[in-house]
Amino acid sequence: MRPRVKKLIGGLVLVVGLIVYSFIVLMIGQFRLAQSGPVVQLAFFAFFGLIWTVPAAILIRWMERVDRR
């Protein structure tokens, strides 16, 4: 696959995936942590705010990988 096509696909997947992920985390946080204290909410959103970098890093590594053809 050509590098430009991989970067286009990866960029679209990254943006759409991050938007969907953020809405899911916000809904879970809003309904599950409504009665929790601010420390629990901060820990929840800090953890899930950083965990999305793992799949993003894998996707970016795939986008930058050179095909050996």
Image (cartoon, rainbow, N blue to C red):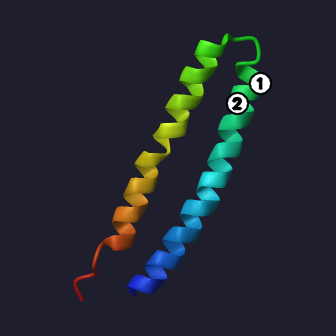
Q: Residues within 10 Å of mark 2 (few under 14, many from 20)?
A: few
Q: Residues within 10 Å of mark 1 (few under 14, many from 20)?
A: few
Please, what is the three-letter code of the amino acid marked with disc 1? Phe
Marks 2 and 1: in contact by CB < 8 Å? yes
69 left or right of 49 in image: left
State the residue position of label 2: 28
Residue 6 visible in the current orientation: yes
Q: Position of residue 20 (x, y in %)?
A: 67, 51
41 left or right of 51 in image: right
State the residue position of label 1: 31
Q: Position of residue 5 (x, y in %)?
A: 48, 83
Please, what is the three-letter code of the amino acid marked with disc 2? Ile
- When asked about the image quadrant of residue 38, the answer is top right
Q: The C terminus is located in which quarter?
A: bottom left
The alpha-carbon separation of the residues under discs 1 and 2 comes to: 5 Å
Q: 13 above or below 55?
A: below
Q: 66 above or below 45?
A: below
Q: The N terminus is located in which quarter?
A: bottom left
- When asked about the image quadrant of residue 62, the answer is bottom left
Q: Secondary structure at mark 2?
A: helix
